[in-house]
Image (cartoon, rainbow, N blue to C red):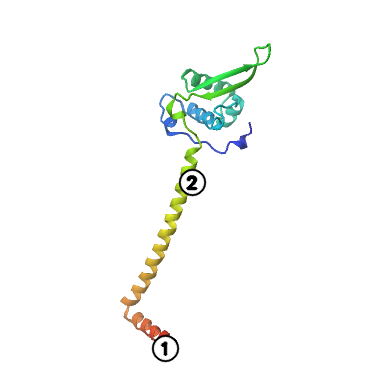
């Protein structure tokens, strides 16, 4: 798997707050969940995970075993014909863990909509701010006697031009 395909990683709060998991387990479980989103499982190698998480392949192997032991994931091995050599490994998040039973990508869409909503509100408040500033400038003119006289003179000139 190519590192460029991994665009980021979102760690669900339930995983983040799970005190039974180490930080590396949380990271790797979230990565497995992300990579399993579309197909329900992933075939990522220990070497690939190790390169992303910055640990050894052996350490990844131990973490995968720990996640399997604690039933966060299921690991299915396919062996080469007439051999004990593993052809591929399939990692499946355990859907019995309630917080693993949803799409990891769904929060992104709600964030995008929230950013859109905030942007629209910001535009509305900017317009209100501009109106308040304009009204404030006009009010300052009325409060300063000299400015008031000049303002009234300009108003008279404008009326004469019409």
The disc, 1 or 2, on the residue closer to the chain's N-terminal end is 2
Which SS class for mark 1? helix
Per the rendering, the mark at residue 112 is: 2
Residue occupied by mark 1: 160
Q: As displayed, is residue 32 above or below residue 87?
A: below
User: Residue 51: x percent and y percent?
Assistant: 60, 30
Quadrant (top left/top right/bottom left/bottom right) for the N terminus: top right
Q: Is residue 130 left or right of residue 53?
A: left
Looking at the picture, how far across and down is residue 22, in whole percent?
46, 26
Binning the other alpha carbons within 10 Å of mark 2 as few (below 14), some (14 to 19) or many (20 upward) gives: few
Q: Is residue 94 above or below residue 5?
A: above
Residue in the image at 52% along x and 19% along y: 65
Above-or-below relation of 156 to 35 = below
Residue, x 36% and y 80% (percent of image)? 147
* Gap between marks 1 and 2 measured at Cα: 54 Å
Q: Residue furthest right?
A: 82
Mark 1 crowd level (few <14, some 14–19, many ≥20, 10 Å Cα): few
Nearer to us in this view, 132 or 145:
132
Q: Nearer the viewer, residue 43 or 147?
A: 43
Give coordinates of residue 61: x percent, y percent. Answer: 56, 20
């Amino acid at each position: 798997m190519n590192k460029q395909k991994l665009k980021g990683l979102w760690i669900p709060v339930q995983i983040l707050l799970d005190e039974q998991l180490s930080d590396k387990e949380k990271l790797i479980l979230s990565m497995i969940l992300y990579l399993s989103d579309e197909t329900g499982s992933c075939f990522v190698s220990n070497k690939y995970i190790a390169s992303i998480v910055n640990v050894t392949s052996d350490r990844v192997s131990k973490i995968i075993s720990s996640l399997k032991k604690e039933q966060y994931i299921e690991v299915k091995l396919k062996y080469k014909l007439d051999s004990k050599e593993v052809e591929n490994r399939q990692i499946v998040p355990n859907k019995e863990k309630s917080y693993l039973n949803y799409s990891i990508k769904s929060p992104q869409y709600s964030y995008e909509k929230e950013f859109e909503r905030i942007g629209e509100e910001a535009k509305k408040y900017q317009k209100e701010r501009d109106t308040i500033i304009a009204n404030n400038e006009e009010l300052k003119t009325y409060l300063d006697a000299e400015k008031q006289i000049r303002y009234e003179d300009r108003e008279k000139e404008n009326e004469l031009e019409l």
